[in-house]
Image (tube, coloured by chain):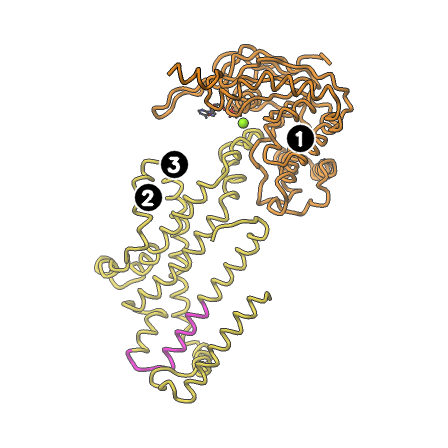
Chain colours: A orange, B yellow
Amino acid sequence: MHGDVHAQFAGVTRVYPGAGGHAPVHALGPINVDLHKGEFFAVVGPSGCGKSTFLEVLAGLQQPTVGTVTFEGRAVAGEVPDGVGVVFQEDASFPWLTVWGNAAFGLQRQGTAPAEVRRRVDDALAFMGLKDFAKAYPSQLSGGMRQRVCIARTLVLQPRLILLDEPFGALDAQTRLLMGDEVLKLWRTTGATVLLITHALDEAAMLADRVGAMSARPGRFIEIIETHWPRDRDSTIVAEPTFGEITGRLWERLRGESLKALGHSGQPPAAALAAE
Amino acid sequence: MTRAGWIRLLVIVAMIGALELACRLNFIDHRVMIPPSQMATALITMLASGQLNDDIVRTLGVIAIAVALSVVFGFALGLIIHALPRLRAALDPFFATYYAVPVFIFYPVMIAIFGLSLVPIVLMGVATAIVAMIIATLNGLDRIPRVLTKVARVHRMGRLATALQLQLPAAAPYLFTGVKLSVSYAFIAVIAAEFILAPAGLGRDIANAYADFNNRRMYALMLLVLLIATVVNAGLHAWDLRWAKRRGARPS
Ligand SMILES: Nc1ncnc2c1ncn2[C@@H]1O[C@H](COP(=O)(O)OP(=O)(O)O)[C@@H](O)[C@H]1O
Ligand SMILES: [Mg+2]
């Protein structure tokens, strides 16, 4: 599983500068981690811990305050590198275009030949189970389907690194398991490196080769757990004992951090009160 | 047509029928109102003779100019005000109360400045319509999802491409609402301004007919104005519906 380094964080810290009288926010780091070529890496952590910041720094959407991020050996600086696709937490489908138009957007911008656009978009829509909805508009689809549209829009550009920021955050648990299967299929078929941000421990444990557990803000990896799942896994592994072990271990590491994120000090309430 | 549509049509037909009957049976004095059927025949005769052509062209032309100016400058001002949050905060109460103030009272002032020409009428139309467009533009810009800027960067789009290919279409439904409102407001302001004081135009025609006790002409002209307003609004509404169907939840 430990192939070539595909992307690397070296001493990366991100501090949001204070604006309008607000204090600066130290959101992330220091982070040192390598993503290997073709691996499925998941990041879990309490909300507000810096997961999206981590992803956006890797995508080149934000600059590290300290340290460097490299993708395929080149420093990521100020722009999204070629070969990186991003699916955001928010619904980013274009309501004014059909599903087909959404998926074709990136290729048409690049000036790809129409026949090639048609071929790749049709493939991507078929792959994402959207073939029958090609002429529909996003408003006619469910939230899960709309996220698929966004994935298809990314997929047609044949990214080598796919970044997914809580793409199923708004979906119910069963739909999320099924979407997890889709993502696994996508990962296997494309051979791309996948980074999945999630707040769901089970999702991370089920999908990833490695799961990075992130501390409360500023986000740092407290532990990176290897799952040793076979490559052709699917959501049925949630029934395996190892799955419970991994999820349990993640929760053990993250419980204190989640309490911190809730505003607790990590001590029992009585001790916290006494310390006032 | 939908069920509601049929019912609406039925209500209108019934009301016109009742009015016709009331006039014919002299419940309503013919010096007060003529039967709708006579309004229609009078209007058809007047239209056929071509005597209304100049006034129709003039009034609709003035409205079109007022709408065009309102939409273009309202949009531009909206962009500027949106980019300057402090200015916006200062102007917000003004926008919120604008339509509570009868801007119309400034019409005599404008005539005093610009004389009895097209200019004060166009300005009245713009003064009434432009703020609706500014407010709609601000609203539309506020509602552009922030994630689109990130999407733009993932696709390595420049400022202009982002604005034209992502932000403009995202805000389009709100901008269209502004256009619709501008049309309605300009229509009202222009006809009213002509009515009060103007050398020509449909509003002036109605006022003249009234002064001459020419009921046939007055009611025919009123019917014409109503018909034009209805057709224009129905057209805009139909267009709006087509969008709404595609884009789901929409304003207004
Ligand atoms: N543009 C910003 N300016 C200031 N603080 C920010 C900004 N974006 C995020 N933050 C703060 O940084 C922290 C991490 O945010 P984020 O990476 O979005 O967390 P997560 O995705 O894990 O929920 C949060 O406390 C958030 O409030
Ligand atoms: Mg986030």
Mark 3 vs 2: CB contact within 8 A: no
User: Mark on residue B92?
Assistant: 2
Q: Nearer the viewer, mark 2 or mark 1?
A: 2
SS of the residue under disc 2: helix
Residue B34 placement: quadrant = bottom left
Q: Is residue A190 magenta-colored?
A: no
Q: Amino acid at mark 2?
A: Asp
Image quadrant in which the C terminus of chain A is located: top left
Write down the chain letter for disc 1. A
Numbered range of the magenta stretch:
B211-228
Image quadrant in which the N terminus of chain A is located: top right
SS of the residue under disc 3: helix
Write down the chain letter for disc 3. B
| Residue topped by disc 1 | A157
Residue A209 placement: quadrant = top right
| Residue topped by disc 3 | B83
Foreground residue, A207 or B26? A207
Does the image show residue A84? no
Mark 2 vs mark 1, CA separation in Å: 44 Å
Q: Position of residue B241 (x, y in %)?
A: 55, 56
